[in-house]
Image (cartoon, rainbow, N blue to C red):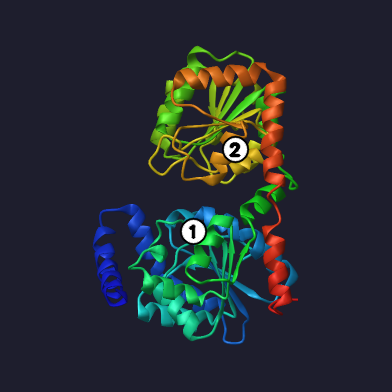
Amino acid sequence: MYFIYNIVVVVAQFLLKIIAIFNSKISLFIKGRKETFFKLEQAISKKDRVFWFHCASLGEFEQGRPIIECLKKENPAIKIVITFFSPSGYEIRKNYKVADVVCYLPLDTKKNVQLFLDAIHPELVFFVKYEFWPNYLKELKKRNIETLLISGIFRQNQIFFKWYGGWMRNSLKAFSYFFVQDKNSKKLLNTIHFENVTVSGDTRFDRVFEITKQNNELDFINKFIDNHKVLVAGSTWKDDELMLINYINNEASEEDKFIIAPHNIHSEDIQKLKNEIKKPTVLYSEMEHKNLKDFQVFIIDTVGILTKIYSYATIAYVGGGFTKTGVHNVLEPATFGVPILIGPNYNKFKEAIELVKSKSCFVVNNSEKLSVHLKNLFLQNETRKLAGNVAKKYIEERTGATDKILKYLKDEGKIK
């Protein structure tokens, strides 16, 4: 199977170059990887102590971020290399200042692996949550490089737990230690004879909890809200927006305000969204010299500020719950003590499931249910406050994963 895997990776590398001609996302995937070794050559010398973090995409980066920032703060001489597999993670975080290098992970061919590890010669490696690349793991094991899995999560249907998955189980031997999110993951690893496992929880809770301590003030949002209640709808897709438009146009109180931060911010789509809303609407890109308090709807056609905007929410709507991939990050509004509305596709996300069970997050399948929940939460102050407090408590009770990982590193003499 390992032999077949290597053939597949080489063939995939060739095919992706062809697909990139017709697909902009794959084009970024290919072009970005061409820059990787040049970036490493410019930033990393043979004398440097290097810690390498691999994140599949943006979500995994946010899980690794508390560890990255703590390590850099306490050990500023160490160089941090962060790799992404996905363009959606890399493009947003390519200028992350805490890291010394942010780049794409070269595809998992034997040649790429050797060149990459020679270039960064890492002292310590962190894989975040998942993405188990056999050639990378095999070579890390061969070179005896300390490798940790953080915020890991395992499920019964993964290849490691199948009768034919021996070659992938073998790759897990590269990990010196597993820090997993839940007891089930630990139990599954134990069944295949891995005992070097701790249930540390999810470092994302530490990350979102820290967000509440930073300065989240945005003067233009203060001016827009003007002491009114506000729904903040983040990472919305078309199906989410159709329901929101219907509510805003036909049922919303003139006293309530709405902030929509779409997942897709292409100018044509943003303009179409604006045109479909009958209430006074302003875009972030057009707000200069506007009296923001005169508008009822604010469309955020930029990236990077949604987390701060959630801090202003009376109610949050998190998009993606009508897509195949599922709902986006519900933890960011939850940490601010805000009741949350989501679409029906959330069952792949443990935190969404648990927030729904706790009745701090409410599922809407259609416009009618959205209307019922919004009217109730806008009007019923005690109901809204109770749901928000439950969400906030959910976050606070699950912090601490970062401290457990840092303690292990200190006890093992890896850091001061």
Q: Amino acid at mark 1?
A: Phe
Residue at image location 39% in from the left, 34% down from the top: 268
In the image, residue 165 lies at what x, y percent? Answer: 36, 68
Under circle 2, the secondary element is helix
Determine the CA span between mark 2 and mark 1: 21 Å
Q: Amino acid at mark 2?
A: Leu
- Residue hosting label 1: 154
- Residue at 54% across / 82% down in the picture? 121
Any part of residue 228 in sight:
no
Residue nearest the viewer, comparing 246 with 414: 414
The residue that label 2 is drawn on is 355
Q: Please state the horizontal and vertical placement of residue 10, each as a whole percent of the image.
A: 28, 73
Residue 282 x %, y %:
54, 27
> At x 61% / y 43%, what residue is drawn?
331
Graded by Cα atoms within 10 Å as few (under 14), some (14 to 19) or many (20 or more), the crowding at tag 2 reads many
Mark closest to the chain's N terminus, 2 or 1: 1
Question: Which residue is drawn at the image coordinates 75% and 76% (left, top)?
Answer: 416
